Image (cartoon, rainbow, N blue to C red):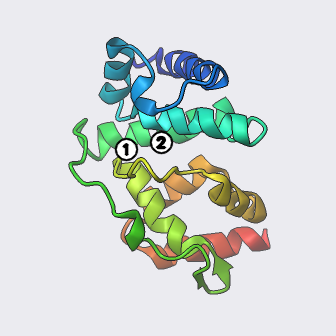
Amino acid sequence: MRHYDFPSQFRALYETAVALYARGQRGADTYFTPEERQFLAANGLTVQNLYDYAEDHHGYAGEPGPDQALAIELVRRDYFFNAQGGRPSAVVIDAGQLPAKTDAVRGIAWLPRLIPKARAKLRGELPPSLMYCCGGDRRFFKEHNILPAEFLTLVWRHEQQPEAIVDWVLARQRS
C-alpha cells in the first residue's frame, strides 16, 4: 500500500465519481473497478462514500467538494488504521435510531443527531442511506463555523464524552 499517494488517488476517484454521476450513472454498485474498490476498502472507505460526494457535488453546487471530502476521509482513514487496526467494523447503525433532526441539546439543534452520526462515520458504520456531511450537516457546520473534518477529530477525541463535544461547540460559537 502506498500511503503517501492516498490524497492523489482519492482525488482521482472523487473526480471519476463526479464524472460518472454527471453522465447519469446511478447506484454506488456501478462505480469503480475491482482494483479501485480494493483501494477504498484497504483504506477504510466505501464506494458509497464517493457516490454520496458525487451526488451532493451535483445537487449542491459542488459541495462538499473534493477538499472537504479528502479532509473527512483522511480522518476516517486515520481512525481505521489507528483505532480499528485496519479492520472494518461489522456493525451498521440503524438510521431510525438516530435522534430526530429537530432535537437539540443546550439550544443547539441537529447536534444530538450529528454526534452519533459522526461516531458511525469514524467507525465506518453508516448505512448507505446516511451521509456524513450531507446538506443538513453542512448547514450545521456553516452555522457554527466548524470544518466537517475538525468535528470528526473532536468526536474521536471525546468518543465517550458527548458533553465535552457540546461544550466545545458552544465555545466555538462564542469565538
Comparing 109 with 5, the one in front is: 109
Q: Residue furthest bottom?
A: 106
Percent across and percent down for residue 42 are 30, 26
Q: Are marks 1 and 2 in contact (CB under 8 Å)?
A: yes
Percent across and percent down for residue 75 are 47, 42
- The reply, left or right, for residue 44 in relation to residue 25 is left
* Mark 1 surroundings: few (<14), some (14-19) or many (≥20) residues within 10 A: many
- Decide if residue 2 is in sight here: no
What residue appears at the point 39 percent right and 56 percent down from the top-left corner? 120
Q: Quadrant of the C terminus?
A: bottom right
Q: Which residue is mark 2?
A: 75
- The reply, left or right, for residue 107 in relation to residue 80 is right
Amino acid carrying mark 2 in the image: Val
Residue 70 position by quadrant: top right
What residue appears at the point 65 percent right and 60 percent down from the top-left corner? 136
Instruction: Tell me the SS state at disc 1.
Output: helix
Alpha carbon separation for disc pair 1 and 2: 6 Å
What residue appears at the point 64 percent right and 70 percent down from the top-left corner? 169
| Number of marks present in the image shown | 2
In the depicted structure, whether residue 14 falls above or below residue 143: above
Amino acid carrying mark 1 in the image: Tyr
What residue appears at the point 51 percent right and 53 percent down from the top-left corner? 152
Mark identifier at residue 113: none
* Mark 2 surroundings: few (<14), some (14-19) or many (≥20) residues within 10 A: some
- Decide if residue 129 is in sight here: yes
Q: Which residue is mark 1?
A: 79
Q: Quadrant of the N terminus?
A: top left
Percent across and percent down for residue 81 are 31, 36
Residue 63 position by quadrant: top right
Instruction: Tell me the SS state at disc 2.
Output: helix
